[in-house]
Image (cartoon, helix red, strand yellow):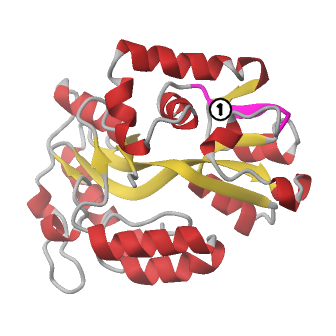
Amino acid sequence: MTWDVVDVELSDAIRACDEGLLETIDHSTLPAAPDGTPATEDFLPGTLHDCAVANIVWSSVYAYDSSKTRNWNTPTTMADFFNTKAFPGKRGMRKSPKVTMEFALIADGVPVGEVYNVLGTEEGVARAFAKLDTIKDDVVWWEAGAQPPQLLADGEVVFSTAWNGRVFNAKNAEGQSFEMVWDGQIYDLDLWVIPKGSKNKEAALDFVAFSTATEQLVHRRHGFLMVQHAHHLKLVLALSILMPVSIWQTICLQLLQTLKMPFRTTTNSGQTMLTN
């Protein structure tokens, strides 16, 4: 075993734990919040698992270069991503069924709250592939998170699915004129896991505890939401100047109304989706 701690997506963490590939993590060993709230109560629901501890919340969205669009013809929906007549040009998409299949169904008119029920059927899978077929000649597949901003910057694509943190960084740290379309966004988590048989298990557990303390999570906040209740409203207010008003209002409302259950988690794939 080479690695002691690995950062993975939620579906991978769940699958690896179910297959016995990961060490279990005692959540009682995680540090309490600054106000003394135990980690088991401070972490958002769905972010602590038998073999994994979440460190950020992020979304899959799609982005475009606003310097190359007209104000009256900017994309606003997932259906626009698939509309090559109104928005001609290449599309960047992740070379993975995760998110890609969901986006296809959303674009085809499936309500976000029903996507995984539909995708759990043979007819739903066929429907997603049929929608993807409508743009298959215009797709540029990407595999690494750094690729979508580069594809947009180089003008190789007009739209690209992307991880919101990558677009956030390109826009606010590198000065790119990118905008994100949040319609149909899919929430996910990055989580720390410890491979079974790690030779440095205790040090790995210490690292997970240290890196998921509130003080350390604050430093990872740029473009992401933290996985603890602590500081959430302060963070959203700080990011509000960088978000469309409608998105900011939606996030604030959801934090106030649904902090106890901010995700819709599916048991089959471990994917999480924001529902209406």
Q: Outermost residue toward the bottom?
A: 35
Magenta segment range?
87-95
Image x and y of residue 35, in percent: 20, 86
Using the image as rendered, state which of residue 254 and residue 205 is in the foreground. Answer: 254
Placement of the C terminus among the 4 image quadrants: bottom left
Please report the residue visible at 29 percent of the width from the left and 72 percent of the height from the top: 257
Is residue 91 inside the magenta stretch?
A: yes
Please report the residue visible at 28 percent of the width from the left and 44 percent of the height from the top: 265
On screen, 161 above or below 108? below
Please report the residue visible at 21 percent of the width from the left and 44 percent of the height from the top: 201
On screen, 221 above or below 185? below
Image x and y of residue 1, in percent: 31, 28
Can residue 84 be seen in this snapshot?
Answer: yes
Residue ID for mark 1 = 93
Using the image as rendered, state which of residue 197 and residue 184 is in the foreground. Answer: 184
Q: Is residue 219 left or right of residue 107?
A: left
